[in-house]
Image (cartoon, grey):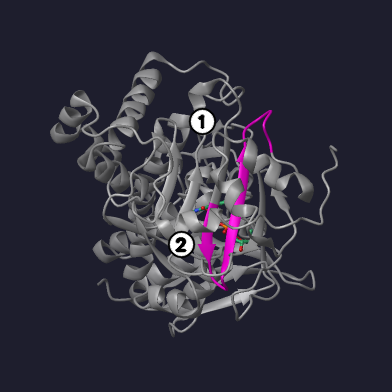
Amino acid sequence: MTQPTGTTRVLILGGSLAGTLAAAALAPHVSEVLVLERERVLPETPVPRPRLPQAAHAHMLWAGGADAIEELLPGTTDRWLKAGAHRIPIPNGMVSFAPAGWFRRWTETHYLIGASRDLVDWGVRAAVLQIPNIRMRTGATVISLVGNASKVSGVRVQDKDGQESVIDADLVIDATGRGSKILQWLGEIGGPVVEETVVDAGVRYASRRYRAPEGTETNWPVIHIQADPREGRPGQVVSIIPIEDGQWHISLSGTRGGEPSADEALFEEFARGVRHPLAAEFLARAEPVSDVVVYGRTANRQRRFEKAAMPAGFVVLGDAATSLNPVYGHGMSAAALGAVALRDTAAKMPVTSAKFATRAQKAVARPATAAWLLAVGQDRFYPGAVTKAPTLGDKLAARYVQRLSRTAIGNFLVVKALTDVMTMKKPASVLAGPAVLFAATRGLRRPLLEGPDLTERERSVLDREPLVRAEKSRTV
Ligand SMILES: Cc1cc2nc3c(=O)[nH]c(=O)nc-3n(C[C@H](O)[C@H](O)[C@H](O)COP(=O)(O)OP(=O)(O)OC[C@H]3O[C@@H](n4cnc5c(N)ncnc54)[C@H](O)[C@@H]3O)c2cc1C
């Protein structure tokens, strides 16, 4: 551990997942961490807050992200589970319809956490606020950076009464999320122009919570009906994620031209119209307990701060640097792995060192880039997502992943490798290892499944009568 020298102050802009994890990552290496969050009050229980609209949508936390959080804040997984979250084994706890067909439910190799986003954040925040040298100031909106092209020395903040002040720091971390104004702020202090790439499949989300049918409140799988970018129609996805309070969180999503509606009466109709109606069959037997909420800011956006001549004393983390199409469920895990990378850099050199920000930005970019490549590898095939047609290389890479995904249905070694990558436990390079290449060449070891691989208990829910709905479709 690099021991704090003098009074080293780190300012973290944004007190959501990336911000709180960055605070936990740096606290052992500095004397003071101050988190600035524009939300007026952060809840003390796992409930929604206004400045986190995406929390109304299902959030899967893959093992790679959950393990990273546990590494930074030991005991967090227990806190989530005690509050009702589920530890869902993968691949056996997932009924997934991929482009090539139904996945087998092989023995557990990985897991994910099934919980609302509010519960995930609460578990992290509660742990972070117990660390003595971390403070959180709410109602504090950062309005600009202070410094110049060579060095950031602080930020200008507006409090809830409109009063402005400057706070100095040795290191500033931007974790203000997808809506970050960082490119503008950098421009204002004469900072570099940062390369930005956008791949936008025009995905819109519609989400709703249901009470799980009686007897399915625990040990229930994730139901995931995936899209197929090569089908030549908009990609439509349904996910049912078991969360706390005996509920299922359902998110529908559709790319440009196939977006789900905010109309409650059309929610299950959309679920029935995707590539397989299994999720709709389960929903027909469950009771909605929330409104339908929609969300449309889902473009993949990558800002290459690690390639720019950035001012010293400044690092960008989480969605502010790389925001991803949420369908792949990687944003939180990439942020958590980025925070671990920040901690590891701080363990090697003082955060006040001239090279710290450059090194940290490069380290933080690695997991984010891995998630970016997975997302755009699929999304660039949807109409209107990119201005240039996919290259031969893009097409070959996509075809290899497609072949692996098909082989995975009948080959444990390949499903394990794909799950390593999907859960962010290992980099995508494992898919190019000799054993996986050989397996891909040989193809399926077992036949494709004709239908979903359901247990007797799961199947018995489908034998129940569908519930009668009060909501009438606008279309009839
Ligand atoms: C519909 C949807 C579904 C998703 N599903 C998944 C999923 O299944 N799995 C997954 O891993 N990820 C998912 N994500 C992605 C995930 O939500 C983000 O990756 C994650 O929230 C990034 O965290 P962050 O801390 O970088 O940003 P955010 O969580 O957006 O937080 C930014 C914080 O900064 C604060 N802030 C903003 N501006 C200022 C300012 N000027 N001054 C002070 N504070 C400020 C905000 O109030 C907020 O608290 C989903 C996203 C969406 C949109």
Q: Quadrant of the N terminus?
A: bottom left
Specify whether residue 254 is painted magenta: yes
Q: Quadrant of the C terminus?
A: top right
Q: Using the image, tell me which numbered label, if any, was put on residue 220.
A: 2
Return the x and y of residue 338 as percentages of the image width and height: 39, 55
Magenta region: which residues?
A: 240-259
Where does residue 69 sit, x and y in percent of width and height?
38, 66
Q: Report x, y in % for residue 309.
A: 43, 41
Residue 379 has which mark?
1
- Secondary structure under tag 1 reads helix
Q: Eyeballing the image, is 80 above or below 395?
A: below
In the image, residue 161 above or below residue 202:
below
> Mark 2 Cα within 10 Å, few/some/many (few <14, many 20+)?
many
Q: Secondary structure at mark 2?
A: loop
Is the residue 129 above or below the residue 61 in the image?
A: below
Q: Disc 1 residue type?
A: Asp
Label 1 and label 2: CA atoms lie apart by 29 Å
- Image side of residue 97 versus residue 269, left or right: left
Residue shown at the point (61%, 28%) measured from the top left? 234
Residue 51: name its quadrant.
Answer: bottom right
